[in-house]
Image: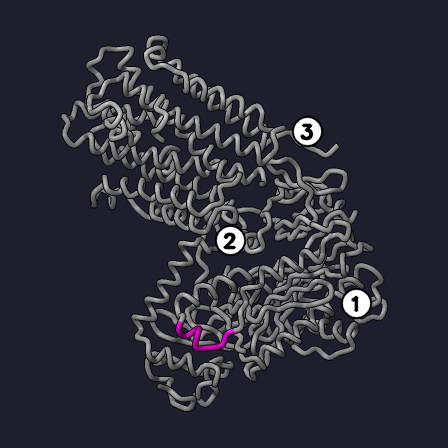
């Protein structure tokens, strides 16, 4: 497979995951504000914006339409649905002969749909449903990808892109919830917020099945960090990253693969054998930022091995 | 149900239909329906305008969702548009097709002979058939190609020739596109959409299939591979996602199951071309390139090109990689050289041309230039090296000012311009804004040549000038297209 194609598939997948993440967070934000006092709303939006690395639009966070515009149709905001979808589609367009026609058609349709929708239209109808629609369409795209594309090298690059992005986004999300909880008083984050955090990861129901509806911060952290079965947990994602890198290594020959695989294996082992009480008592925030550093290192190793390797090392002798 | 002689013009859905002195593809001058179109007329009379409209919308949506678009170069960077698709087929009988087929075969064989001769012995120049200065002053003539042996003598292996039909029903050649012709993907997708939009009509006719174009193209490219590479790696080289024909590049790569590469994916080392893959570097043997000569290799041609591959030309000269089409084929589709094609056919094949040329005035010749300058309001003036409807003047549809501007340009650089009489392109029924009206059309069949055989899939791209009365069919100038049926 062409290195550039691997690059496009990887980023297409990351941007699709990012779009879904933004849509999910907006959805949670909008449902959360329904039953709250105006004073309680602002810090919650601020937290969601921080999880997306987005500067709040001024001090005034009363108007959800302004916030949703920033996160949905504002193409100048790199975390907005429009910006992410444009890049996802642009990457898909550059490899449209590699992905299946069905994948391309659905990515293109979703892009056209987002592009032709204004924030006023979204608010005229039921905004929560719009974001629900985006999520469903993205799930559809993922399903179509799995069902119509060969599970070969390209598909594994898509997997790696998706799960690295997921790890990255989930650590940030955990951080914005746990930082006030761990550093200030407990009053800032209440039970509603822990539920919101789980919902931001579409993990509330899954959490309840494991721990019942008794939502405890340490258990939330355990679930999102270390659960082996939830596709939303960091451990599960790291597992997928390692498996796919393993497969890619087999396609490409192990000569290239060693470094990236070792890094992915190390991350996975750390999560496989991690204990949540230890992690919290040592330094959860440090742990999260270390995971992000490891993700960056894996990303670099993938590029070194498969995509932007130095030519003189690859020339025939 | 209409019979051939029934007057359907004036009746719905033909209430706005008119006949002029242009050849009408559907109706004879007396208003009777041409035999091949009777079934179409029947179906159209039985469908309500709403039903037609619905099918048209369905077709448009299919194109949009599949991203079958082209990019328009304008002030706004990279606007994607769908190529307007007209629902009604253009139908050619087997007799009409046979003449087109044998005419194109003859032409492509002769033009390849011509190119081989030009870049080797120059017999045709020595014998004074074509003036030397006309060849050497051609912008697309490449001295770098002198003495280079092209595999199987196939200089231009992939061709899309533009034909138009004159009022007497005769097809004539308007342009040979011998460099990087495009449009074949629209021919193929138009057919796919047609089969879905009007399946009953389609099955009522016996239409010859065109779907094997991809396989034939692949076989042609494979035939051109260097002899010492029995399992050649073939790639399609695209300028990238911002090129107007990018959709077509992806489409063809997929149809053939070959890698779609950009210049940055390739590199030359020791006169061998490699592509950068996740496995490491992989050798490339044949490049179906959709990049113009100028941009192929910054070390040989335009140094500012970032689309090409530094060192590609030397690898090509060394015979380690094959390009299709070869470099320098543009000299043979120069619009001034075009006027010599009948002479070229006679010179190499000893035959009269089966498909006539359009009479052409070379502004390079003083007497013809004088005539052109006096008759700018009647003629169509074109730049010799351009395509896509750029840099041209359509006399009868132009203003005095535009004519004066063009006169200046012609005087400044006469070699660069030719003129032709304004042709009455034939007209075909089109579904426009809910009614059926005639529009001017042309025809671009696609020819493949592997050095021995020519293959022309029965069909082509019928381009439509969608604006009423317009004669310009280019997609960049607001043209559309229709499916083209060749009957058994």
Left or right side of A56 for B302: right
Q: CA distance from mark 1 to mark 3?
A: 53 Å
Asked if labels 1 and 2 share a chain, the reply is yes
Q: Which one is nearer the viewer's eye here, B25 or B398?
A: B25
Q: Position of residue A117 (x, y in %)?
A: 30, 46
Residue A193 seen from this side? yes
Measuring 48% from the left and 48% from the top, which residue is drawn there? B78
Question: Is residue B181 one of those drawn in magenta?
Answer: no
The disc placed on residue A313 is: 3
Q: Position of residue A35 (x, y in %)?
A: 14, 30
Q: Position of residue A36 (x, y in %)?
A: 15, 27
For label 2, count other residues whose C-alpha is less than 10 Å away and answer few (under 14), some (14-19) or many (20+). Answer: many
Q: Which residues are magenta?
A: B200-207
Asked if labels 1 and 3 share a chain, the reply is no
Pinpoint the chain carrying mark 3.
A
Q: Quadrant of the N terminus of chain A?
A: top right
- Colouring used for the render: one colour
Give the SS element for disc 3: helix
The residue identified by callout 1 is B131
Pinpoint the chain carrying mark 1.
B
Q: Residue furthest top?
A: A282
Asked if labels 3 and 2 share a chain, the reply is no
The residue identified by callout 2 is B247
Q: Position of residue B486 (x, y in %)?
A: 53, 75
Q: Which is closer to the viewer, label 1 or label 3?
A: 3
The disc placed on residue B306 is: none
Give the SS element for disc 2: helix
């Amino acid at each position: 497979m062409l290195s550039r194609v691997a690059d496009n598939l990887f980023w297409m997948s990351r941007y699709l995951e990012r779009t879904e993440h933004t849509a999910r967070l907006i959805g949670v934000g909008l449902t959360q504000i329904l039953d709250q006092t105006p004073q309680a709303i602002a810090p919650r939006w601020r937290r969601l914006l921080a999880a997306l690395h987005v500067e709040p639009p001024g001090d005034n966070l009363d108007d959800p339409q302004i916030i949703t515009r920033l996160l949905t149709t504002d193409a100048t905001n790199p975390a907005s649905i429009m910006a992410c979808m444009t890049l996802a589609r642009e990457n898909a367009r550059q490899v449209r002969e590699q992905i299946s026609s069905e994948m391309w058609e659905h990515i293109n349709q979703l892009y056209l749909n987002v592009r032709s929708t204004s924030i006023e239209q979204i608010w005229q109808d039921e905004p929560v449903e719009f974001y629900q629609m985006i999520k469903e369409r993205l799930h559809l795209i993922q399903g179509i990808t799995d069902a119509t594309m060969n599970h070969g090298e390209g598909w594994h690059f898509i997997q790696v892109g998706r799960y690295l992005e997921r790890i990255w986004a989930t650590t940030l999300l955990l951080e914005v919830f746990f930082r006030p909880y761990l550093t200030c008083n407990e009053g800032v984050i209440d039970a509603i917020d822990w539920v919101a955090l789980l919902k931001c990861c579409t993990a509330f129901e899954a959490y309840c099945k494991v721990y019942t509806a008794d939502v405890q911060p340490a258990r939330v952290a355990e679930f999102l960090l270390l659960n082996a079965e939830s596709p939303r947990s960091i451990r599960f994602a790291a597992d997928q990253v390692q498996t796919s890198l393993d497969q890619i290594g087999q396609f490409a020959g192990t000569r290239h693969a060693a470094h990236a695989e070792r890094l992915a294996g190390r991350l996975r082992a750390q999560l496989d054998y991690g204990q949540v009480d230890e992690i919290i008592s040592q330094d959860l925030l440090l742990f999260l930022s270390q995971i992000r550093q490891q993700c960056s290192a894996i990303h670099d190793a993938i590029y070194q091995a498969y995509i932007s390797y130095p030519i003189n090392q690859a020339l025939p002798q | 149900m209409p019979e051939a002689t029934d007057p359907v013009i004036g009746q719905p859905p033909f209430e706005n239909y008119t006949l002029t002195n242009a050849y009408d593809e559907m109706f004879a001058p007396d208003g009777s329906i041409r035999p091949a179109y009777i079934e179409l007329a029947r179906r159209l009379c039985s469908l309500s305008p709403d039903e037609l409209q619905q099918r048209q919308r369905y077709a448009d949506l299919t194109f949009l969702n599949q991203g079958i678009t082209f990019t328009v170069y304008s002030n706004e960077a990279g606007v994607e548009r769908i190529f307007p698709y007209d629902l009604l087929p253009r139908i050619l009988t087997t007799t009409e097709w046979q003449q087109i087929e044998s005419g194109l075969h003859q032409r492509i064989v002769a033009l390849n002979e011509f190119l081989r001769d030009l870049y080797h012995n120059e017999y045709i120049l020595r014998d004074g058939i074509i003036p030397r200065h006309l060849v050497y002053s051609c912008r697309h003539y490449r001295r770098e190609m002198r003495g280079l042996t092209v595999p199987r003598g196939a200089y231009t292996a992939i061709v899309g020739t533009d034909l138009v039909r004159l009022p007497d029903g005769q097809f004539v050649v308007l342009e040979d596109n011998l460099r990087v012709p495009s449009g074949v993907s629209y021919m193929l997708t138009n057919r796919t959409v047609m089969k879905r939009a009007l399946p009953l009509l389609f099955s009522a006719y016996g239409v010859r299939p065109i779907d094997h174009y991809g396989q034939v193209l692949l076989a042609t490219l494979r035939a051109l591979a260097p002899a010492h590479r029995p399992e050649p790696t073939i790639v399609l080289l695209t300028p990238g996602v911002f090129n107007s024909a990018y959709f077509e590049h992806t489409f063809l790569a997929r149809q053939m199951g070959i890698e779609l590469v950009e210049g940055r994916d390739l590199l030359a080392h020791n006169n061998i071309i490699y592509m950068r893959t996740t496995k490491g570097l992989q050798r490339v043997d044949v490049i179906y390139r959709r990049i113009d000569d100028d941009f192929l290799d910054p070390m040989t041609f335009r140094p500012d090109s970032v689309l090409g591959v530094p060192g590609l030309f030397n690898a090509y000269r060394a015979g380690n990689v094959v390009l299709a089409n070869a470099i320098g084929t543009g000299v043979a589709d120069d619009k001034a050289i075009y006027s010599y094609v009948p002479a070229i056919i006679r010179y190499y094949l000893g035959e009269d041309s089966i498909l006539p040329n359009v009479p052409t005035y070379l502004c390079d010749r003083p007497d013809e230039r004088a005539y052109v300058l006096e008759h700018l309001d009647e003629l169509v003036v074109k730049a010799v090296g351009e395509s896509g409807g750029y840099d041209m003047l359509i006399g009868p549809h132009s203003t005095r000012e535009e004519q004066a501007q063009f006169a200046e340009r012609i005087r400044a650089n006469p070699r660069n311009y030719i003129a032709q009489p304004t042709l009455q392109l034939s007209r075909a029924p089109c579904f426009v804004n809910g009614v059926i009206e005639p529009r001017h059309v042309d025809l671009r069949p696609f020819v493949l040549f592997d050095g021995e055989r020519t293959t022309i899939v029965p069909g082509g791209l019928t381009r439509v000038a969608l604006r009423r009365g317009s004669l310009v069919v280019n997609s960049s100038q607001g043209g559309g297209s229709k499916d083209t049926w060749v009957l058994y």
